[in-house]
Amino acid sequence: MKTSSVIAMASLLLALVGVALFGQNTSINFVVTALIVALAAQGWNLLGGYCGQFSFGHAAFFGTGAYVTAALQSRYGVNAWAGAGIGIAAGAAIGWVIGWLSFRAGLRGSYFALITLAFAEVLRIVANATPITGGGTGLLLKLDVRASNFQFSSRGVFCLVALACVMLVLALTIWLARSRLGAQFAAVRENEDAARALGIDVLATKLRAIALSGAVTAAAGCLYAQYFLYLDSNIAYGSWISVESLLAVIVGGIATPAGPIIGALALHALGEGTRLLAGRITGIDLVLFGLILVAATAFAPSGIAGAWKALSARVQRARA
Amino acid sequence: MYTPAIIAEAMVNGMLTGAVYALVALGLTLVYGVLHIINFAHGALLTCAMFAVWAASELLGINVYVAIVPLAVIFLALGYALQRFVIGPASRGDDANTLLVTLGLSIAIENGLLAAFKSDTRTLSGDAAFDVVEIGPMLLSRPRLIGFAVAVVVALLLWMLLRLTDSGKAIRAVAKEKMGASLMGIDVRHIYALTFGIGCACLAVAAGLLMPTFYVTPRVGNAFVLVAFTIVVLGGMGSVAGALLGGLLIGVVESLGGLLLGESLGQAGIFVIFILVLLLRPTGLFGARA
């Protein structure tokens, strides 16, 4: 990372910690929601950005993490932290199963995007019809504020926990991008046949990517369940999280470590801004998101991170 | 538990609905066959067409079946412009970009409709939905019978357009060999946009056939688009005959699934078929290409 990027990231981090410590409830709510989406998007970025497999159904992982965490607590009395751990493992497992089924069948590109969408929809319909998830009425977690129960008396503390999760995955992503596994991801993304010719086990590499991606996005689901203490099938497995995790990555900068975080914060700031300007018209912020997705694809394919890189390179050249 | 008569009626009803599904799928498969892109905005455009039908009938007082004709022309132009000036230039021929651009369009259209019309459920006034015809031992809905007939006629017309007209020949040439077609003096961008327009016109017709017995909300397209994707994958991407047969089949499956498992789980049946077909036979039942 360049010094300028490190400084930019550090000041962003400082600002977020500042909000967590001194912010009002509304601003903390805003940051927590954006961080949860950022975490889900970091998961998407591992599979879609680094390994090149575009998923339209990351809700499958988000929802699984959220439901496993919540259902284990409310139905079986499992400790919340343990529940979250199992939820993350379940996200990895679901990712592995979906990956094993679809990558083994040779699905890529649009076909892979379609089948992930279908898996998420099946899970949504099933979750809406089975009693263990509370069906259509949803699942309400008991309010029991104890740190050992993954519930905190102050929203600021929760915000710091979410921030820590996002930073942990950021570190993991930076490490991964330089590791052997990251190189294998890139090889599979750029040219599968060439990767195979170099002796890379393409299927195994993709399975690692989707399991890792599933675990990270499931962690976002766990955080959601613990923060809002309520779930139903349209929240947990709804297409909103599939779309937002993809959108945050594209807007922030695909296959860059900080892209998902920048993208999620930028999108949520924009969404709030539109709602302030246009009033509470349902859907108006999403209209803008959709148009931004089109415009970003057309004019800024490498996102905010890419624009930043180009800008700082130009500044450096001007100084020299 | 279920008498053969009930099952037979469910199957025939499923086929009647399936023909209209087939029309939705026909637009999707045509666009895929020629442009080799998956149009994620298809469902949102269908919703748009259904609102247009609703508005023409409720606000302007035009008979639904009459309104279909001008709406088909409007949607042809809309689709043409969308591909020519938005989707084509924005995606620069890259598969991943097209996915993102059409996804962005569908989000924008769907939520634009939500902002304009709220999430209320709208139906056409009048009691067309209860208008039934007795055929043998079965009671069948008249609008659905009309829908079936019109859908089949439109599919035939489309097939003739592709076979017999110069534009149809050009479309088939571009589908087979883009470079060769362009060397023969065919304007590929025009043909792409024309194909997209025809796909949208199919949606306008389907919307007109659906509205008398169905409802519209800004999110209604989602349900249809996954059904349409299933049909397209089942019938083989790009195959017109496959889309027709796939549509009838899925209509029957949905109807029987709803009868045996209940409405919401019956819907899951469609997605399970979709996943199974993608996993076991991604070329579909009639498709030759992978």
Image (cartoon, coloured by chain):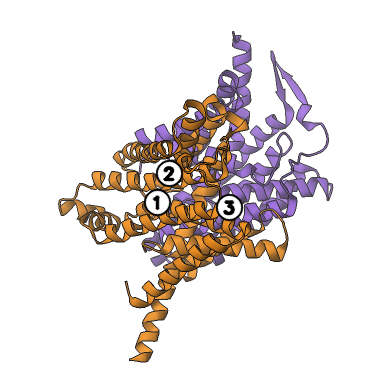
The answer to which of B20 and A102 lies nearer the viewer is A102
Letter of the chain shown purple in the rendering? B
Can marks 2 and 1 be said to lie on one chain? yes
Please report, as a chain letter, where disc 3 is located: B
User: A121 left or right of B211?
Assistant: left
Label 2 secondary element: helix
Give me the C-alpha separation between circle 3 and circle 2.
Answer: 41 Å
- Chain hosting mark 2: A
Q: In the figure, what tint was chain A given?
A: orange
Image spot of residue B135 (x, y percent): 70, 18
Question: Visible in this render: residue B171?
Answer: no
Q: Mark 1 Cα within 10 Å, few/some/many (few <14, many 20+)?
A: many
- Amino acid type shown at disc 1: Gly
Q: Which residue is mark 1?
A: A43
> Which residue is identified by label 3?
B198
Seen from the viewer's position, the closer of residues A240 and A37 is A37
Are tags 3 and 2 found on a single chain?
Answer: no
Q: Which mark is residue A218?
A: 2
**Residue at point 52%, 30% (across, down):** A74
Q: Amino acid at mark 3?
A: Ile
Task: Work out whether residue B46 or residue B271 is closer to the camera in this orientation and state it.
Answer: B271
As drawn, the label of residue A54 is none
Q: Compared to A313, does B136 lie above or below?
A: above
Expressed as whole percent of the image width and height from the top left, the position of residue A113 reads 43, 47
- Amino acid type for the residue under numbered disc 2: Ala
